[in-house]
Amino acid sequence: MDALRIEIDRNYDSFQRSLGKLLRDHRGQYALMKSARIVEYFETPGEAYRQGLARYPDRIFSIQQVSEQPTELGMMSVAVR
């Protein structure tokens, strides 16, 4: 398994365990995640992605929308705004 996939899976697991608490304050926002921690929240996936690239040139990070619906954004499968 490659490093990015491992990072995404670890971040997603951590995110899901905290989701109930996150929904209260960050519903609809996008969480930039690294090492199973939320680094910062953003209003759009594009903002989160650009900040992820700026902070982590190795591109080993993931983005998760704070929502009840599971959304895989770690590989940036959505259009960057």
Image: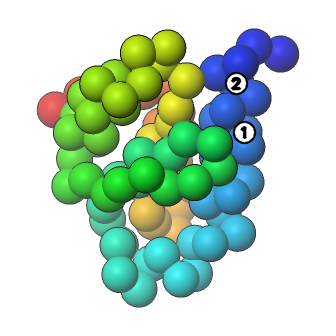
| Residue behind mark 1 | 9
80 on left or right of 3? left
Rendered residue at 63%/42% (across/down): 35
Give coordinates of residue 25: x percent, y percent. Answer: 35, 81
Tell me the element at label 1. helix
Tag 1 and tag 2, C-beta contact below 8 Å: yes
Q: Provide residue 6's location: percent of width, then percent of height.
A: 75, 29
Instruction: Give the quadrant of the N terminus.
Output: top right
Foreground of the two, 81 or 18: 18
> Residue 64, which numbered label?
none
Instruction: Tell me which corner region of the image, top left, top right, bottom left or bottom right, holds residue 7.
Output: top right
For the residue pair 43 and 60, the one nearer the viewer reads as 60
Residue occupying the point 73% across, 43% down: 10
For badge 1, the amino acid type reads Asp
The quarter of the picture where the C terminus appears is: top left
Write the residue at 49% across / 14% down: 58
Element carrying mark 2: helix
The extreme right residue here reads 1
Q: x, y percentage for residue 60?
A: 55, 24
Whether residue 78 is visible to the viewer of this picture, yes or no, is no
Say if 81 sits above or below 23 in the image: above
Crowding around mark 2 (Cα neighbors within 10 Å: few <14, some 14 to 19, many 20+) is some
Q: Separation of disc 1 and disc 2 at Cα?
A: 6 Å
Label 1 crowd bin: few (<14), some (14–19), many (20+), radius 10 Å: some
Is 12 situated left or right of 68 in this image? right
Image height of 41 relative to 23, above or below: above
Amino acid residing under circle 2:
Arg
Q: Which residue is mark 2?
A: 5
